[in-house]
Amino acid sequence: MSTHFYQRCYTLLEQIPKGKVTTYAEIAKALDSKAYQAVGSAMAKNKLLIIRPCHRVIRSDGYIGEYALGTDKKIELLLQEGIEIVDGRVYDLNKFIYTFKQQSNNTL
DNA sequence: CATCTGACACAGA
DNA sequence: GTCTGTGCCAGAT
């Protein structure tokens, strides 16, 4: 797989602790890119969605967004993680949001 | 609240 | 190798 970009997305996915969620934009920014949509595409293209907890990735609006197994399934999974979801969106996104640290070689 | 445009990476022709 | 279309989106109007 030469999809180096996608691989990075999957790697960041594993960085998300259980009970926490993140947004596509956050992942994109963590990759120093603005391809938030490409990040989502990585999840969709991912066949290991069972292994890769892509369900912990939601939209910046706080809404769950789409999911390969269906939005309802994604919500169910998040509920099991302990995320409070109301009316198809996270009640307190900022409460469960997880931001990636700058793991890049920041040699300032 | 609904709608349109913008930005980026990947797949197909 | 280049062009077009699209996608688990984001932000502004």
Image (tube, coloured by chain):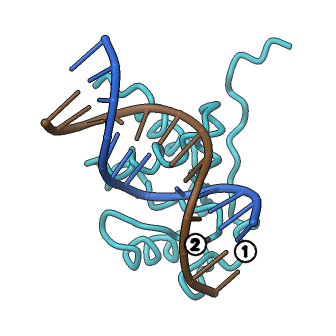
Chain colours: A cyan, B brown, C blue
Q: Please, which chain is the residue tagged with disc 2 on?
A: A
What residue does disc 2 label?
A63
For residue A75, the mark is none
User: Which amino acid does the dot numbered 2 rest on?
Assistant: Tyr
What residue does disc 1 label?
A92
Locate the N terminus of chain A and report the quarter of the image it occupies: top left
Q: Residues within 10 Å of mark 1 (few under 14, many from 20)?
A: few
Residue A27: quarter of image: top right
- Which circle, 2 or 1, is nearer the viewer? 2
Residue in the foreground of this view, choosing between A8 and A96: A8
Q: CA distance from mark 2 to mark 1?
A: 11 Å
Q: Residue at x 49, y 68 (%)?
A: A65
Rendering coords of residue A91 (x, y %): 68, 79
Q: Is residue A99 above or below residue A89?
A: above
Please state if A63 lies on the left or on the right of A71 as rendered. Answer: right
* Marks 2 and 1, the one that precedes in the sequence: 2
Rendering coords of residue A2 (x, y %): 32, 22
Circles 2 and 1, Cβ within 8 Å, touching? The answer is: no
Rendering coords of residue B2 (x, y %): 56, 83
Locate the C terminus of chain A and report the quarter of the image it occupies: top right
User: Which amino acid does the dot numbered 1 rest on?
Assistant: Asp
Q: Residue at x 53, y 82 (%)?
A: A88
Q: Residue at x 37, y 75 (%)?
A: A73
Identify the element where label 2 is drawn.
loop
